[in-house]
Image (cartoon, helix red, strand yellow):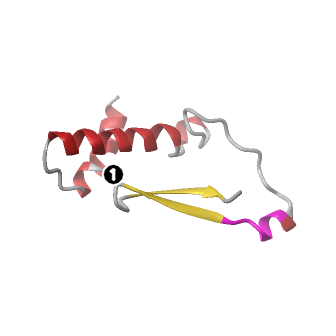
Amino acid sequence: MERWIQSCRHELLDRTLIFNQAHLLYALREYEQHHNEHRPHRGIANARPLRALPDPTTEPAALARLRIHRHDQLDGLIHEYEHAA
């Protein structure tokens, strides 16, 4: 829990101006979703807690045509990246 609070403070609260309690709760919900569903965690081999690791791509032809899309969360404070379909 201490590690989550520290990450939340450094990655979100130290960089965001919070206007009221409703804004704080919205920002914390968005950060929690990012933290649990998208952000890789070093302690579990860079897997996301709620998703399994994808199969590695080692084929050179597949790597050459790899396309990545970026999605911004919290007005660009958090960036999420995923493979394009």
Q: Which residue lies at the image location 32% right of the left edge and 43% below the top edge?
A: 8
Instruction: Give x and y (percent) for residue 80.
Output: 50, 55
Instruction: Give x and y (percent) for residue 35.
Output: 44, 41
Q: Is residue 75 left or right of residue 63?
A: left
Q: Which residue lies at the image location 27% right of the left edge and 45% below the top edge?
A: 9
Tag 1: amino acid: Glu
Instruction: Give x and y (percent) for residue 11.
Output: 33, 51
In reply to whether residue 63 is colored magenta, the answer given is yes
Q: Is residue 27 above or below residue 36?
A: below
Q: Is residue 59 left or right of residue 48?
A: right
Instruction: Give x and y (percent) for residue 31.
Output: 37, 44
The quadrant of the picture occupied by the N terminus is top left
In reply to whether residue 81 is colored magenta, the answer given is no
Q: Is residue 61 left or right of residue 37?
A: right
Determine whether the residue tagged by mark 1 lies in a helix, strand or loop: helix
Q: Which residue lies at the image location 13% right of the left edge and 45% below the top edge?
A: 20
Kindly indicate the quadrant of the structure image that contains residue 22: top left
Q: Is residue 3 above or below residue 65?
A: above
Query: How many marks overall?
Result: 1
Q: Is residue 56 above or below residue 41?
A: below
Kindly indicate the quadrant of the structure image that contains residue 69: bottom right
Circle 1 sits on which residue? 11
Residue found at the very far left of the displayed protein: 20
Q: Residues within 10 Å of mark 1 (few under 14, many from 20)?
A: some
| Magenta part of the chain | 62-67
The quadrant of the picture occupied by the C terminus is bottom right
Residue found at the very far bottom of the displayed protein: 64
Q: Which residue lies at the image location 68% right of the left edge and 40% below the top edge?
A: 53
